[in-house]
Image (cartoon, rainbow, N blue to C red):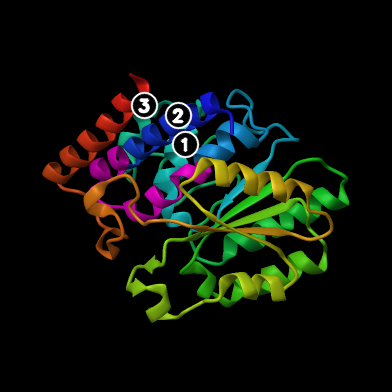
Amino acid sequence: MDATLKKQLEIAATKVRMGIIEGVYNAKSGHPGGSLSVADTLTYLYNAVMNVDPTNPEMADRDRLVLSKGHTAPALYSVLANRGFFPVEELKTLRHIDSRLQGHPVRNKIPGVDMSTGSLGQGISAACGMALSGKLSNETYKVYAILGDGEIEEGQVWEAAMFAAHYGLDNLVAVVDNNNLQIDGKISEVMSPYPIDEKFAAFGWHVITINGHDFDAIEKAFQEAERVANQPTVIIQKTVKGKGVSFMEDQVSWHGTAPNEEQYNKAMAELQAKLDELTK
């Protein structure tokens, strides 16, 4: 990856993480852990890959993104805000009454949101429908779906996987955010979906496994996915829940817990220090 682009992405991802913490803190509720773990991939997609226009969020040929793990909406909101779809200051209204930034994405309220999600397992099915529609209509757009590794314990995910392979949806790329933690503990202990790669391969998908915090690896994965024909691609990204905030990293307790004032100040100080280091 070009060094300048990589630095720009690292700066953008740090700002996205700051927005996540800002939103969850002001809401006094939400899901910081999985939002932080997926921040790098969402940053890369919206800043380096996807054909989107903040001034025209409904343009017909835009690429689509479905946040199937909809509870990590703070990450999507922060990326969209930092990309210019709505003011960054609005992140502070997360989950407030009358705010359009509710706990899960709402399609008809938030610029840049392509699907209302929240019930785990359903987002990938919607993404399959979008991709098939694009195929049937000879459209050029791509569809990206972000799933949690706990989410793929849902049976509907595997129905969608079968559907996508059957119809050869090479305009669909799924990302499994494999941070190995869900609300009740390690996914390997709650209801193990491992081996994730072999399961998707058995369903007919092209499988790529990467470090989800390495922008070079992320870029190579999406470039590889672009070259795949006649089958959907899944990128299994190994990540750290709570990535970027030291006391949240790999701690299941931060799946759905908001920081208090002291924790908020500590998290923001860490992220500001990272941003200062990147921009000096």
Q: Name the residue under label 3.
A: 278
If the image is split into quadrants, where does the C terminus sit?
top left
**In the rendered image, which quarter is residue 33 located in?**
bottom left
Residue at 65%, 36% in the rendered image = 50
Disc 1 secondary structure class? helix
Residue 93: horizontal and vertical position, in percent?
32, 37
Q: Mark 1 points at which residue?
A: 79
> Tag 1 or tag 3, which sits nearer the N-term?
1
Q: Give the range drawn in magenta.
A: 21-42
Q: Which amino acid does label 3 sit on?
A: Leu
Disc 3 secondary structure class? helix
The answer to whether 155 is drawn above or below residue 163 in the figure is below
Is residue 35 located in the magenta-colored stretch of the structure? yes
Q: Name the residue under label 2.
A: 82
Residue 230: horizontal and vertical position, in percent?
84, 58
Residue 32: horizontal and vertical position, in percent?
33, 51
Residue 66: horizontal and vertical position, in percent?
59, 51
Is most of the magenta stretch helix, strand or loop? helix
Residue at 78%, 58% in the rendered image = 169
